[in-house]
Amino acid sequence: MSLREIFTYPNPVLRKKAEPVTEFGEELQQLVKDMAQTMYDAPGIGLAAPQIGVSKQVVVMDNTDKDEENQLMVLINPEILSGEGSLTDKEGCLSVIDFEAKVKRFSHISVRAQDMEGKTNEFEADEWFARVIQHEVDHLNGVLFIDRISSLKRALYKKKRKKQLQKEALEAA
Ligand code: NI
């Protein structure tokens, strides 16, 4: 297992549509292990493969509370089959540093995804759980939560990020 670098906005890998997984072998298992380790280390509640620079349709999540035992969920080639209702709540992202904003999402979704063995499962998700899945599936389509907020808020974030990057560049020089 190894800890992987998390790529951040505006890295172009975050904008690429991820490729479907077709081989369910050792390589996939290794990728999932690295993603899980990277997510728990961050810490985050979800991570999509493009966030570590791997353009594949793989998501890891852990929706349990801090005081509960970890329960890793792995979604391969996930698809949102349908959605209904709407909820607006704050979101953040490991690839969008130091920023949170309210995002409107379906409150209930039906999902189809494969597991690590390639077996297809269908299930329903509500509220926060549904939100995390929608956020992660967006990553696989090259979409970030800042694409789903007002253009004014997005402009503010872009300005803030630009300043951060300039500061980093100066410090590195
Ligand atoms: Ni994210």
Image (cartoon, helix red, strand yellow):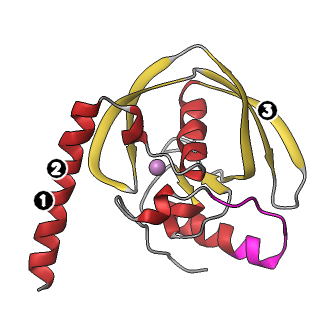
Q: From which residue to which does the magenta span run? A: 18-30
Which residue occupies 84% across, 69% down?
23
> How crowded is the residue under tag 3: few (<14 C-alpha within 10 Å), some, or many (20+)?
few
Q: Is residue 154 magenta?
A: no
Q: Amino acid at mark 2?
A: Lys
Mark 1 vs 2: CB contact within 8 A: yes
Q: Quick check: 143 above or below 25?
A: above
Q: Which residue is mark 2?
A: 159
Q: Which residue is mark 1?
A: 163
Q: Amino acid at mark 1?
A: Lys
Whole-number angstrom distance, CA of label 3 to CA of label 2 = 39 Å
Image location of residue 114, percent across then percent down? 82, 51
Q: Amino acid at mark 3?
A: Phe
Q: Secondary structure at mark 2?
A: helix
Q: Secondary structure at mark 1?
A: helix
Q: Which mark is residue 123?
A: 3
Which residue occupies 59% across, 33% down?
129
Establish whether ligand 1 lies closer than 8 Å to the Cβ of label 1.
Answer: no
Total of numbered circles in the picture?
3
